[in-house]
Image (spheres, coloured by chain):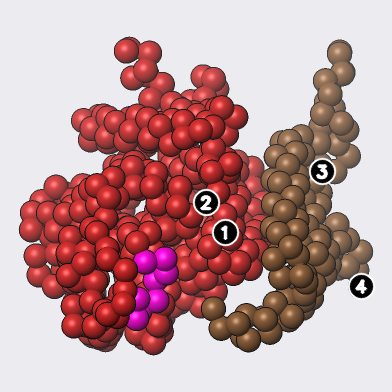
Chain colours: A red, B brown
Amino acid sequence: MEWVHKHLPALIIMVPLCMGLVTAIIGRRGAGWYMAMGTTAATIAMAIQLLVNVLNTPGQSITYMHGNWPAPFGIAYVIDPLNAAILVIVALIAAIVTMYARKSVASEISVGKLHFFYGLWLFCITGLLGITITGDAFNLYVLLEISSLSTYTLVALGKDRNRRALTAAINYLVLGTIGACFYLAGIAYLYMATGSLNIADIAARMQDIYATWGTDSPQYQKTVIAGFALMAVGLSLKLALFPLHGWLPNAYTYAPSAVSALLASTATKVGAYAFIRVIFTLMGVDFAYHLLRTDVALLISSAAAILFGSFIAFRQTNVKKLLAYSSIGQVGYITMGFALGSVTGLTASVIHLFNHALTKGGMFLALGVVAYRVGNTKLQSLAGLGRKLPFTMGAFTAGGLGLIGVPLTAGFVSKWYLVSACLEAGRYELAGIVLVGSLIALLYTWKVVEVIYFGKRADDAAPMREAPLTMLVPTLLLIGGSLYFGIDSSLSAHIAETAARFVLGGTP
Amino acid sequence: MQMVLDYYNYWICVVLMMIGFYGVMAKTNLIKKALSLSLFQTGILVFYISIGKVDGGTGPVTVEGATGVVYSNPLPHALMLTAIVVGVATLSVAMAIIVNIRERYGTIDEKDIEQMELESNE
């Protein structure tokens, strides 16, 4: 037990990684799901234990050195309140969606490929957890590619339902690889300037470089700026920040239901985390926001994302695509929070990351039930389902209210923090945009809810039962969670604020 | 002109990357697109390898008894071994998806696929 505790940061990556391989080899005849479920359950236990450990450690930071190589030479895993919180989010969503996946995936993917599916599923989760936990810039790239490569394949596996999954996957692959390459090139520039790959070590050496910039002989000025620009563009592509969101709508729409739910609630969130890490820890706020004014570009992109994403969502007739465009808008809220650069803003980002993961994940799961029972997710197929699938559609509606930000839902809490952060910074126009975004969210949610409850179901439609329990329970868990954290936000807000204070170094 | 000659290694990788980038954006044939993506990655590989070179440096192998020897930096080379593996994996996933596209659509040209999707209106 002592041994497990000591090596927890490595185990949380190694267990899903090894189990992914094992599952792909021997997970035939339905065994794959049990292995994935057991692994994700173990992962969530480890993630919660890590969060507790970090919050109880003086200094609130744990460094784990692989193979006992000291930090700048070996690969270090660094856990602080911010990434411990993200680890819990990813592990929690992964475990709940895996529970759901069994029936949903079996109905969408041919039986002979199920063990490969769950193998890739675990690799994807490994990559996402790894990006979050690693303290090494190059290691982050490798884990980014592990999660991306498995995601491309998972999206492409939606081909049995609709062949457009294949074109969505190749499009995602091309854009995702370009994004990762930009990030890789960015690291090369920083390596030229600092000679290090460890994030904490780069950050420390960067201070010496900044110190020379005010003098007559500034060192590496162009190198560092070019490196940061490349990394920022690469990561923006990964987190689908407007206008680099092109890959997202089709990938989410045509992927298998469980994959859409996992991606929507974890992949973009982890991208946002990596971006926060690069801006606040690696480069420092002074450089990124005060010298380069990246915050202006980010705020414009976020505002455009909120308005554009929500508006295009309103015009969709496929509900899954509607949710995908809504995700682009929601990413805008997250980036707007940390672009403000204040403790409140960063708190709003982290808390929205969590709340949106629960809400959107739950909505995609509810929609997966529709795909399971009806066969497609077109708007007209949802007509009158409010009476046929009362719990599922109730969950969907509650999730929709969360997207709008109605009080007593988690969405309200995060928007409250975001609007306070905007007002605190004196940016009234941004607060206005957040409110307009919520208004458009009201329109697109109403558009679906109206069809669900007031639409008329075709008279000759086949009889239909409520979703099977293994699909209903995860859906209700996620949506119930989003309602719980909307009513009692003390836990989520406390962790988000601790994380924000830690990242900003305690100075508000 | 002097600038081009002085930094010829950077120019090589910029030119490689831009040829790749152009191919990714402008070509409609998916195989050509995937190969261009590979070229784009190769540009970055060359960049990493060239920054590992130290002026007057020799191979990073310790010579017994020798003092004052300058070694080239082997770390970027080691990193690129990983990046090459990632590149190969990306290319093979891309090819696998393209094979599937050929089976389902009967073509690997993006324009034709777009046309088919507009007509079928799925």
Instruction: Using a 10 Å C-alpha cutoff, classify the residue at mark 2 as few (fewer than 14 neighbours), some (14 to 19) or many (20 or more).
Output: some
- Do callouts 1 and 2 point to residues on the same chain? yes
- Can residue B31 be seen here? The reply is yes
- Eyeballing the image, is B35 above or below A455? above
Say whether mark 3 and mark 4 are on the same chain. yes
What secondary structure is found at the residue carrying circle 3?
loop
Left or right of A207, for residue B48: right
Q: Nearer the viewer, mark 1 or mark 3?
A: 1
Residue appearing at x 23%, y 32% in the figure: A52
Spatial distance from mark 4 to mark 3, Cα to Cα?
23 Å
Tally of numbered discs = 4
For label 1, the crowd category at 10 Å Cα-Cα, with few meaning under 14, some 14 to 19 and many 20 or more, is: some
| Residue drawn at x 40%, y 52% as measured from the top left | A104
Residue A424: x and y in percent read: 19, 73
- Label 3, on which residue? B53
Q: CA distance from mark 1 to mark 3?
A: 50 Å
Residue at x-position 75% and y-position 39%: B81
Check disc 4 and report the residue beneath it. B1
Residue indicated by mark 1: A160
Residue A109 badge: 2
Q: Amino acid at mark 1?
A: Asp
Mark sitting earlier along the chain (4/3)? 4
The residues bearing labels 1 and 2 have C-alpha atoms spaced at a distance of 6 Å
Residue at 51%, 78% (x, y): give it: A243
- Circles 1, 2 touching at the beta carbon (< 8 Å): yes
* Tag 4 near tag 3, CB within 8 Å: no
Tell me the subunit letter for badge 4: B
| Residue range (magenta) | A374-381
